C-alpha cells in the first residue's frame, strides 16, 4: 500500500502515540532521507481556532530553544487544512510508563532525572518560556548509544514572556489549564506564569518517583485544587521507605506554597538534592598533611585492615600549600590532621588559612613532645586538638571520632538560619523589619509614614464559623489567606496582622499606592479564578471584600511592657478607613475613597460605587470601585488535563 505523504515530503509509516491534541506518527523525510516523528492535529480539533493557535504555539515555542534535553522541532506546516509538527524521532518510553511499571526509583536515578530535566527547564526559562504542564507523561526517556537521555515534550500550553504583561488580568491563556496533580498553587489560581511554577511540578515528579505517591492525590479535581492551595502533604519519612535523610526538609522547600520560599532555580534544586544523596552515602573525609614519605602507606594499611570500621575517605598532602589546593578540590573535607613542621608551608600557617577555604573543617595538630610551645600556640590559634608523634592509631581514631562529632554539631548550627525561618511564619513582618533596622529597643519607637493600608476580608465568614465545625471553618479561612498573603507580599506589602477574618497589609516606600492597587487586583483575580475552577462549595466561593486607603499613618510599638506583650503596627485614619471600606464592600469589590482615584498613577479604572454607610454613626459617603476588564476563566473540564 502506498504511504500517505503530507507536506509534500513526509511519508507516514505507523502511528506511535496519541493524545487529546494530536496523533504522533513515525514518518520518513523523503528530502533529507531520515526518519522523523510527526504530530498531526487530531481531526476533532481542526475546526477550533484556539486549538490551531495552541498547536502552532507548541512548534514556535520549542523552536526557540535548542537544548539536548528538549525535544527538537524540524518543521511545521499545514496539509489539507490540518496542521502538523515535524520533530526528532525518539525511541524509549515516557516517565509515566516507567513509574507505572516500577512504582519507585532509587535516589541516584531520580538525581539523574532531575539534573537533565533541570537543565532543560533552565534553558527554557532563559528563553522566557514556562512549560506549565510538566508531568511524567511529558518526560521522555530516550534510548541512545550512551544509555538514556531525558527529553521534555509537549509545550502545547507553554507561555512565553511576550504573551502578557505583569497584569494578572491580562493573562491570555486562562483557558489552558494543565494537569492539576502537578500544578502549583499559583497556577491553579490563574496567576501570571512564572518559571517557579515548573519547579513546583519538578518537585512533585521527584516526590512521586521516590515515594511512589503523589503529594496531593485526591481523585476529585475540585477537591485536589483546594488541597494543593491549602493542605500540607505527607512527609516522605511517613512512608517508612529507605530514603536519604533530609528529604522532608527538601520537599518542604520544593513544594512551599509561597513560591518565594522555594528553590529559585532548577540548578539550586538539583544541587540540594545531590547534597542529600551525597550525605546519605559519603564517608567522613580526612585530609592528612605531612611531608614524611611513608605516612600515606602507614595510614592506608591501618584503615584497610579495619574494613568493618572503614568510615573514612583519606586525602593526602605533602605540605600546607598542597593542603590548601586539596581543600579547594574537596570542599567537603571534615578534618585536617597536619604536622607542625613542613617545608613550603608549615602547620601553624596552614591552621590560619584553613578557615578561609573551609570554615566548617576542624584542624588537629601533630607534633613531637619537645614542641609543646608550638602546640600551645596552635591551640590558642584555634586548633581543635593535637596528637603526639609517633602517632598512636587508637588515639588517632578516638580523636577523629570526637572531632567529627564537633564538626557535625557545627554544621547543624550553620543550618540554624534556615530553621529560624520558622519564626517568620508566626511573627509579624513589621516587627522583624523593625528589629532588623533598629534592634529590640526600636520596636517600641514610633515614626510617621506615608503609606497605603489594605484590608482584605473573607465575605460572610462569621456565618461559616457559626454553621460549620471549627476545623472546617478554619480551613476555609486559611485557604483564602494562602491566596491573599503571597500576592500582598509579592508587591512589597507587609502583612501587619490578621484581624479576625481579614488581612491587614501596609505598603510604604516608592509607588506604595500603585503597588497596593496592583496587589488588590491580583488577589481578586486569583480568588475569582480558583472559585470558578474549584466550584461553588469550595472555600473560595465566598469571595473577598477589599478596602484601601492612603495617607499619613503612625508606625509604632504598642502593647504592655509590664506583661511583656508588645507589637508593632500602624495607626491612623487610613487604617480605620481601609477597615470600614472593606466592611462596606460587596464580594469582589475593591472600595476606595475619592482621594485614591486622584492619586493613583497606573492605568487603573475607577467607577462610582454609590453612597455607602462606611463610618459608624455617620452620614453615608460616596465610594469608588476599582475595576478592570478581566477575562473569566472557562469552567473546569471534567478531565484532569486539557492538553496532551
Image: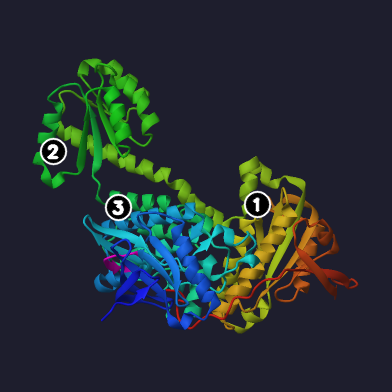
Identify the residue under disc 3. Answer: 277
In magenta, the rendered stretch is 88-95
Q: Which residue is mark 1?
A: 430
Could you say which is closer to the camera, residue 96 or residue 566? 96
Q: In the drawing, what numbered circle is on residue 303?
A: 2
As drawn, 149 above or below 233: above
User: Residue 621 or 168: which is nearer the viewer?
Assistant: 168
Question: Residue 210, can we see it?
Answer: no
- Residue 214 image position (x, y, % from top left): 38, 71
Quadrant of the rendered image containing residue 611:
bottom right
Q: Residues within 10 Å of mark 1 (few under 14, many from 20)?
A: many
Say if 443 sits above or below 535 in the image: above
**Which label's residue is closer to the chain start, 3 or 1?**
3
Q: Classify mark 2: helix, strand or loop.
A: helix
* Residue at 22% over, 15% down: 370
Q: Nearer the viewer, mark 3 or mark 2?
A: 3
In the image, residue 422 sits, relative to residue 35, either above or below, namely above
Q: At 68% from the left edge and 76% from the top edge, which residue is drawn?
A: 459
- Does 93 lie within the magenta span? yes
Q: CA distance from mark 3 to mark 2?
A: 25 Å
Disc 3 crowd rating (10 Å Cα; few below 14, some 14-19, many 20+) is some
Quadrant housing the N terminus: bottom left
- Measured in 3D between alpha carbons, the distance from the residue under mark 3 to the one under mark 1, in whole angstroms, is 38 Å
Amino acid at each position: 500500500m502506498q504511504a500517505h505523504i503530507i507536506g509534500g515530503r513526509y511519508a507516514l509509516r505507523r502511528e506511535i502515540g496519541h493524545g487529546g491534541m494530536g496523533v504522533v506518527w513515525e514518518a520518513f523525510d523523503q528530502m533529507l532521507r531520515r526518519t522523523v516523528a510527526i504530530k498531526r492535529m487530531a481531526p476533532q480539533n481542526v475546526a477550533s481556532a484556539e486549538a490551531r493557535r495552541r498547536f502552532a504555539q507548541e512548534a514556535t515555542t520549542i523552536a526557540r530553544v535548542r537544548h539536548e534535553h528538549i525535544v527538537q522541532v524540524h518543521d511545521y506546516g499545514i496539509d489539507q487544512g490540518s496542521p502538523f509538527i515535524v520533530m526528532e524521532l525518539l525511541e524509549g518510553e515516557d516517565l509515566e510508563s516507567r513509574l507505572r511499571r516500577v512504582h519507585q526509583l532509587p535516589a541516584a536515578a531520580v538525581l539523574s532525572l532531575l539534573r537533565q530535566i533541570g537543565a532543560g527547564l533552565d534553558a527554557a526559562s532563559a528563553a522566557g518560556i514556562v512549560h506549565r504542564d510538566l508531568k511524567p507523561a511529558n518526560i521522555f526517556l530516550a534510548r541512545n548509544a550512551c544509555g538514556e537521555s531525558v527529553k521534555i515534550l509537549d509545550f502545547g500550553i507553554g507561555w512565553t514572556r511576550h504573551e502578557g504583561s505583569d497584569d494578572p488580568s491580562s493573562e491570555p491563556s486562562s483557558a489552558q489549564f494543565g494537569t492539576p496533580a502537578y500544578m502549583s498553587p499559583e497556577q491553579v489560581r490563574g496567576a501570571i506564569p512564572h518559571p517557579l511554577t515548573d519547579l513546583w511540578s519538578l518537585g512533585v515528579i521527584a516526590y512521586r518517583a521516590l515515594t511512589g505517591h503523589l503529594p496531593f492525590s485526591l481523585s476529585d479535581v475540585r477537591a485536589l485544587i483546594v488541597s494543593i492551595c491549602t493542605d500540607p502533604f505527607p512527609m516522605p519519612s511517613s512512608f517508612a521507605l529507605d530514603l536519604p535523610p533530609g528529604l522532608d526538609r527538601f520537599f518542604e522547600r520544593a513544594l512551599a506554597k509561597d513560591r518565594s520560599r522555594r528553590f529559585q532555580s532548577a540548578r539550586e534544586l538539583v544541587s540540594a538534592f545531590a547534597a542529600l544523596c551525597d550525605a546519605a552515602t559519603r564517608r567522613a573525609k580526612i585530609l592528612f598533611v605531612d611531608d614524611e614519605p611513608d605516612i600515606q602507606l602507614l595510614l592506608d594499611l591501618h584503615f584497610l585492615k579495619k574494613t568493618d570500621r572503614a568510615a573514612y575517605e583519606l586525602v593526602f598532602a605533602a605540605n600546607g600549600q598542597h593542603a590548601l589546593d586539596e581543600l579547594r578540590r574537596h570542599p567537603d573535607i571534615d578534618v585536617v590532621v597536619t604536622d607542625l613542621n613542613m617545608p613550603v608551608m608549615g602547620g601553624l600557617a596552614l591552621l590560619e588559612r584553613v578557615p578561609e577555604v573551609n570554615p566548617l573543617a576542624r584542624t588537629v595538630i601533630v607534633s613531637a613532645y619537645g614542641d609543646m610551645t608550638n602546640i600551645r600556640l596552635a591551640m590558642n590559634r584555634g586548633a581543635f586538638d593535637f596528637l603526639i608523634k609517633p602517632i598512636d592509631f587508637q588515639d588517632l581514631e578516638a580523636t577523629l571520632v570526637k572531632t567529627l562529632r564537633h564538626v557535625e554539631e557545627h554544621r547543624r548550627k550553620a543550618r540554624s538560619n534556615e530553621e529560624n525561618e520558622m519564626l517568620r511564619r508566626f511573627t509579624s513582618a513589621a516587627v522583624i523589619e523593625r528589629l532588623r533596622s533598629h534592634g529590640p529597643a526600636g520596636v517600641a519607637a514610633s515614626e510617621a509614614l506615608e503609606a497605603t493600608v489594605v484590608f482584605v476580608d473573607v465575605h460572610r465568614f462569621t456565618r461559616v464559623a457559626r454553621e460549620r465545625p471549627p476545623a472546617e471553618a478554619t480551613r476555609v479561612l486559611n485557604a483564602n489567606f494562602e491566596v491573599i498573603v503571597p500576592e500582598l507580599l509579592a508587591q512589597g506589602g507587609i502583612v501587619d496582622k490578621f484581624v479576625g477574618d481579614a488581612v491587614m497589609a501596609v505598603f510604604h516606600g516608592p509607588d506604595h499606592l500603585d503597588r497596593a492597587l496592583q496587589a488588590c487586583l491580583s488577589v481578586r483575580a486569583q480568588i475569582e479564578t480558583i472559585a470558578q475552577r474549584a466550584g461553588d462549595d469550595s472555600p473560595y466561593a465566598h469571595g473577598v471584600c477589599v478596602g484601601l486607603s492612603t495617607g499619613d499613618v503612625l508606625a509604632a510599638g504598642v502593647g504592655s511592657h509590664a506583661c511583656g506583650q508588645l507589637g508593632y503596627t500602624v495607626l491612623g485614619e487610613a487604617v480605620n478607613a481601609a477597615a470600614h471600606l472593606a466592611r462596606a464592600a460587596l464580594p469582589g469589590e475593591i472600595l476606595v475613597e475619592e482621594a485614591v482615584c486622584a492619586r493613583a498613577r497606573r492605568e487603573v479604572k475607577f467607577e462610582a460605587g454609590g453612597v455607602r454607610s462606611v463610618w459608624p454613626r455617620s452620614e453615608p459617603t460616596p465610594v469608588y470601585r476599582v475595576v478592570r476588564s478581566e477575562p473569566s476563566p472557562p469552567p473546569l473540564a471534567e478531565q484532569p488535563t486539557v492538553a496532551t
